[in-house]
Each structure stands twice: as C-alpha cells, then as structure tokens.
Amino acid sequence: MTTPYRRLLLKLSGEGLAGEDGYGIHPGVIGAIADQIREVHELGTEISIVIGGGNIIRGMTAAAQGMDRAQADYMGMLASVINAMALQDALEKAEVPTRVQTAIEIAQVAEPYIRRRAIRHLEKGRLVIFAAGTGNPYFTTDTAAALRAAEIHADVIMKATQVDGVYNADPARDPKAIRYDELDYAEALRRDLRFMDQTAIALCRENDLPIMVFDMSVRGNILKAVRGERVGTIVRHLGD
C-alpha cells in the first residue's frame, strides 16, 4: 500500500508508558504501543522513534526541587535509555527488528548514535529508537526528535500525546478551547503553544518538517495518520 510518508519519526513521551500507574513501565501499555507500531511497519514505512524518560524522572522537575539541572538532565537521558530498551523488547516480541542508538555511549546495551548507520538500518527495514535525547543537558526530547528527524531526512514527526491535537488553550481547563486542524509554525511560535518546545518547532520550521500531533491512546490512530487520513493537528508552512 502506498502511503504519504516513506520515513517517519514517532515522538513518544515516557509518561505514556506508565498507563494509569503514573510511574514506571506498564507491560500491557507498552505491548499495545508495540502492536500499533507493528501495523505501520508492515506497510513498509520506515520508522524511527524518540522516547522520553518522564515516567522515571523529569530533569526539569528534579531541578526545580533543588537538584543540579545538568545532573538531573543526564539522569533523564539514562531513563530514556531504559524506556528504549523496554520498547525494543516489546517490538521484537511483536517481530519488528529494532535497534537502539543512544547519544550517550553505553556499548553494553545499545549502539552509539551514528547518523549514516541509523539511515542504513531504516533502509534495511529495521526500526530505530533514538535514546538519551541529544546527549546534552538543557535540551528536551522534543528538540532531540526535531534534530534526529532532520538528520535522517524524515518526512514527518508524529508526536503522540494524550489529547487529540493542538488547542489554543488547555482543553482540560478551558471547555471553550478550540482545536486546530492545521497550524502554521509561525502562529504556533507566536502564540507559544506548548505541544512542543519552541526550539523544536523552530528547527522544524527551518527544515520544512511537518509535525503531526495526535492522540495515540486511541487505537489505530497512528495507522490512520500514516495512511493519510485526517488525525489530530498538522503543523507546517501554510503559505503567505
């Protein structure tokens, strides 16, 4: 089946792996995510993933509680490696060949991030999980997702969230919040919409890299998105 996207980068939050527990890794949740990704992989789409570590530790939260920010961020990077290994296990149980590449060298459990090697894995039909963010403190995994997507020439970033798109206000707090079907990068930056951090949005704008924001808790959404069906919000250049 022909799809609009030859190569995509899926951005997953660490919190999304915890399920209702709110902390750690829930086997049922991670298994369901792996099943959805397998369905997309079977279409022949090249898939890469950036995953966070917020279900274990959030660097900014720890820093706000008094920990050194750089130290806390490095701990968050290591948490994302744990999540990447768990997701790799679930994907390979679903018969999806998977490689983990990390921005922090941990040779015993994962490959170091090498751009050309990552692209070669994708071309061979392997899924690649990018862990440990950019390898630098003070940068979010959103920025890591934008950076890796640009480096591997992805066609789109698909950001999985717990809401069905981008709103002009927090829909959990404002019942009158309006959801966008499409949004220009410039407006997202001007309105300081918090679906991604501004550094990541600006990097996507500079590289003309569309961002799709959707609710992955709805079974089948990622498959619909890859097939070109309208799901969530698409952020891109909308013209003058």
Image (cartoon, rainbow, N blue to C red):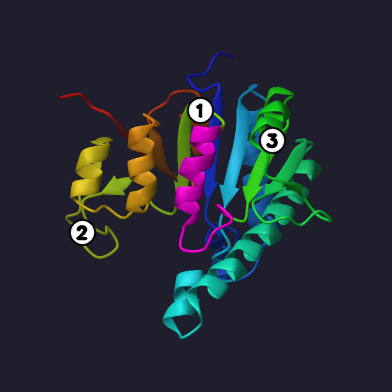
Left or right for 239, reference 221: left
What residue sits right under mark 2 in the picture? 175
Could you tell me residue 198's position as x and y percent? 32, 51
Q: Is residue 124 magenta?
A: no
At 51% from the left and 70% from the top, the residue drawn is: 59
Could you tell me residue 147's position as x and y percent? 49, 42
SS for dot 3: strand
Name the quadrant of the C terminus.
top left
Left or right for 162, reference 177: right
Few, some or many C-alpha atoms within 10 Å of disc 1 (few <14, some 14-19, many ≥20)? Answer: many
Q: Nearer the viewer, mark 1 or mark 2?
A: 1
Residue type pointed to by label 2:
Pro
What residue sits right under mark 3 in the picture? 127
Could you tell me residue 114's position as x and y percent? 68, 39
Could you tell me residue 199's position as x and y percent? 36, 50
What residue sits right under mark 1 in the picture? 226
What residue span does the magenta drawing correspond to? 133-151
